[in-house]
Amino acid sequence: MDAFYASVEQRDDPALRGRPVVVAWKGARSVVCAASYEARTFGIRSAMPAVRAERLCPEALFVPPNFTRYRAVARQVRAIFRAHTPLVEPLSLDEAYLDVTDHLGRFPSATAVAVAIRARIRDELQLTASAGVAPNKFLAKIASDVNKPDGLCVVKPKDIDAFLLPLPVARLPGVGKVMNDRLAALGVRTVAELRRLDAGALDARFGRWGRRLSALAHGIDDHPVNPDRPRRSISAEDTFAEDLPQHQLAPHIQRMAEKTWAAAETHGWRGRTVVLKLKTADFRILTRSITPASPPTCADDLRRLALGLLARVGPPADTRYRLVGVGLEGRLAPAEAAPGRQASLFLAAAE
């Protein structure tokens, strides 16, 4: 979806159309959730501090996010996807992989399916979407960004090299700033330069990830579209109105643990690893985690474990923090997720 949150706001409020819209709470601690394309011309981007966005575009219209509404629209979008194929793998509220290999229906090609889906989104939801059509997931993902907004990019098998080789390696999935810098140190800046490296040399330097890089450089990605991909984590975090010392964090950690547990309950989700996330006043991110022998089974367990992680953060004592988060990771298997039922059976037998 194109500038999803901002586009929903502009659709629902005619006064916002054609204007630079920033979806964010105003304030020194807020970050941009989304920016309309009119706002992006000023250099405003998602995850940017809201105060910087305001400096870049003083006339920008700030709209507080409404995630309940965005989730409702996302469900409508996915219903359109699933009308064309059951193989839909959501990546986020506004993005998904679709496999139409065996689900073309009355359409002659995957490209025709993409055209039809985008037309339905426009006609039924008054929103625009961009699509990438390719022989595998990672090429389709890259292609989906090429002609945004409201665009379509098709990469046929015979055109893979022409499309892929000129790209900077940073466009490959999983190549963030650190990996990009490590590759640059080897003289690798484009996919073509990456492809020239021996797969064995990449394996020796980067291990399994090196083999994956080599495959991507050759346009190979055998990962299937997985409509039942399990959720791997659930979390809640909060940015403070002012930086806090470590000894004042406990109540906020408890509150985030309660929010995380409530979200896990809503989704019927259980995790085995507890994660504490802290962001310092100078924007350093610190994380601590624990995988206890007995996973948390209630909000009290999660609060206790999260508070225990705070003690592992360590000095210096004068460090001040701007954000705290608590998460659960590593979903339990069904048998592990129901210790209460097993205990009740044992107690009934004992009675």
Image (cartoon, helix red, strand yellow):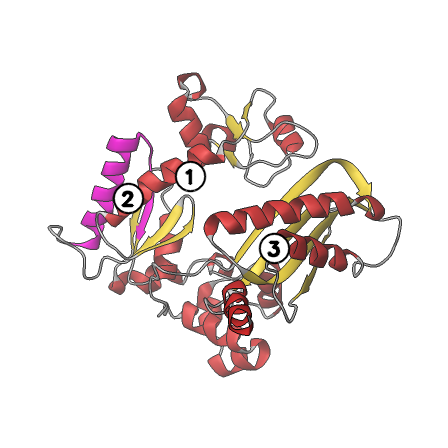
Q: Nearer the viewer, mark 1 or mark 3?
A: 3
Residue at figure coordinates x 27%, y 47% from the top left:
81
Give the residue number, with chain letter if any, for mark 3: 298
Residues shaded magenta: 109-132
Crowdedness near tag 2: few (<14), some (14–19) or many (≥20) residues, C-alpha within 10 Å: some
The numbered mark, 1 or 3, whose residue comes first in the sequence reads 1
Q: Quadrant of residue 101?
A: bottom left
Task: Confirm whether the magenta stretch covers residue 120.
Answer: yes
Mark 1 vs mark 3, CA separation in Å: 26 Å
Residue at figure coordinates x 43%, y 32% from the top left:
69
Expressed as whole percent of the image width and height from the top left, the position of residue 348 reads: 52, 68
Between residue 150 and residue 191, name the one nearer to us.
150
Q: Determine the secondary structure under disc 1.
A: helix
Q: Quadrant of the N terminus?
A: top left
Mark 3 vs mark 2, CA separation in Å: 34 Å
- Residue 199 seen: yes
Between residue 158 and residue 120, name the one nearer to us.
120
Whether residue 86 sits left or right of residue 89 in the image: it is left
Circle on res. 79: 2
Between residue 154 and residue 250, name the one nearer to us.
250
- Residue at the top extreme of this rendering: 15
The numbered mark, 1 or 2, whose residue comes first in the sequence reads 1
Residue at figure coordinates x 37%, y 67% from the top left:
223
Task: Confirm whether the magenta stretch covers residue 178.
Answer: no
Give the residue number, with chain letter if any, for mark 1: 71
Which amino acid type is shown beneath numbered disc 1? Arg
User: Overall secondary structure of the magenta stretch?
Assistant: helix
Q: Determine the secondary structure under disc 3.
A: loop
